Image (cartoon, rainbow, N blue to C red):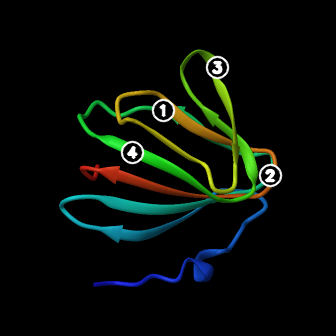
Amino acid sequence: MQVTDLNTTNIFDAKAMRKFLVHDSAWFRIINFNIPAGQTFPVHSHDLDGQLSIQILAGEGFFLGADQAEIPARQGEILVCDIREPHGVKATTDIRILVTIAPPL
């Protein structure tokens, strides 16, 4: 078993998104992204089978999708989608997200 304290990754850079690898294995990958207010994790997709989740650890913003879709995103909410489906996040406040990808990219 492994325990990771996500409080140690609560670091923001006003100019850019910060990325912290939390877990990486043959079965899944977990990444913590900290996105400053006003920044966007651009909409993208991957040409692979599998699923991912984007959990809002703190802050507010929008889950982004195809055709300029914006879904309000707040602390405690989680988006689950196929890896092939366009996805992204826009931060209206400083926002911390936890992304789980299975299988890992």
x, y (%) of residue 93? 81, 52
x, y (%) of residue 18? 61, 63
Whichever of callouts 4 and 1 sits on the residue coming sooner in the sequence is 1
Task: Tell me the tag on residue 103.
Answer: none
Nearest to the observer: residue 25 or residue 57 = 57
Helix, strand or loop at label 1? It is: strand
Residue at 74% x, 43% y: name it. Answer: 61
Residue at 52% x, 83% y: name it. Answer: 5
Q: CA distance from mark 2 to mark 1?
A: 20 Å
Whichever of callouts 2 and 4 sits on the residue coming sooner in the sequence is 2
Name the residue tied to disc 1.
Answer: 44
Dividing the picture into quarters, in which one does residue 64 lie? Answer: top right
Q: Residues within 10 Å of mark 3 (few under 14, many from 20)?
A: few
Residue at 66% x, 31% y: name it. Answer: 71
Q: Amino acid at mark 3?
A: Gln
Q: CA distance from mark 1 to mark 3?
A: 12 Å
Residue 99 left/right relative to 43: left
Q: CA distance from mark 2 to mark 4?
A: 23 Å
Closest to the camera, between mark 1 and mark 3, is: 3
Q: Amino acid at mark 4?
A: Leu
Name the residue tied to disc 4.
Answer: 52
Helix, strand or loop at label 2? It is: loop
Q: Is residue 56 above or below residue 89?
A: below
Whichever of callouts 1 and 3 sits on the residue coming sooner in the sequence is 1
x, y (%) of residue 27? 21, 59
Q: Amino acid at mark 2?
A: Ala
Name the residue tied to disc 3.
Answer: 68
